[in-house]
Amino acid sequence: MKKTLMALGLACACLLAVPALAQSAAPAGLYQALGEKPGIDRLVDDFVNRAVKDPRIGAHFKDVKPAALKESLADQFCQLSGGPCKYEGADMKSAHADMQINKGHFHALVEVLQSAMDAQGIPFAQQNRLLALLAPMHRDVITVN
């Protein structure tokens, strides 16, 4: 529980970070700490499977093709973490424009991602490094107050 609260605290703090953080260079070694492409694929598979079943956010995925979402997220996580992948999906604002996502949904998604990272054995410090890269996206993902 304490670990979850710390991660959520970090994620919330990162929500206030400057948008340029998402554009900065990946932290050294993060791609390797995530298990490179095979590890990221496993993480994303677990994450999406959990998200679609989560009662707080699952409805947001009802019209999504899980395989396509997994491929897109894996490329995004891979690129952000310093891997050789190139994310070619939609920008976050366009992708989430009509989804009616609020802060509670965003925080639930962070919790689901953390659970998936825990299940994949990703060290807590590395989890926080990935969350710090993803958190500034909240400005484009959250579409309702």
Image: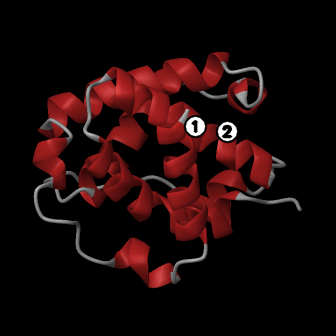
Spot the residue most to the front.
2
Q: Position of residue 69 (x, y in %)?
A: 49, 33
Q: Is disc 1 placed on a helix, strand or loop?
A: helix
Which amino acid type is marked by label 2?
Ala
Residue 63: image location, x then y, percent: 71, 27
- Asked whether the residues under the numbered discs 2 and 1 touch, taking CB atoms below 8 Å apart as contact, a structural biologist would say yes
Tell me if mark 2 has few (under 14), some (14-19) or many (20+) residues whose alpha carbon lies within 10 angstroms of its own. some
Image coordinates for residue 2, horizontal then vertical, percent? 52, 39
Residue 17 versus residue 100: which sits nearer the camera? 17
Q: Is residue 73 above or below residue 15?
A: above
Q: Which residue is mark 1?
A: 111
The kind of residue on which mark 1 rests is Glu
Residue at the (67%, 47%) spot, across then down: 107
Q: Residue at x 63, y 53 (%)?
A: 95
Q: Is residue 61 above or below residue 18?
A: above
Left or right: 73, with 144 as reference point: left
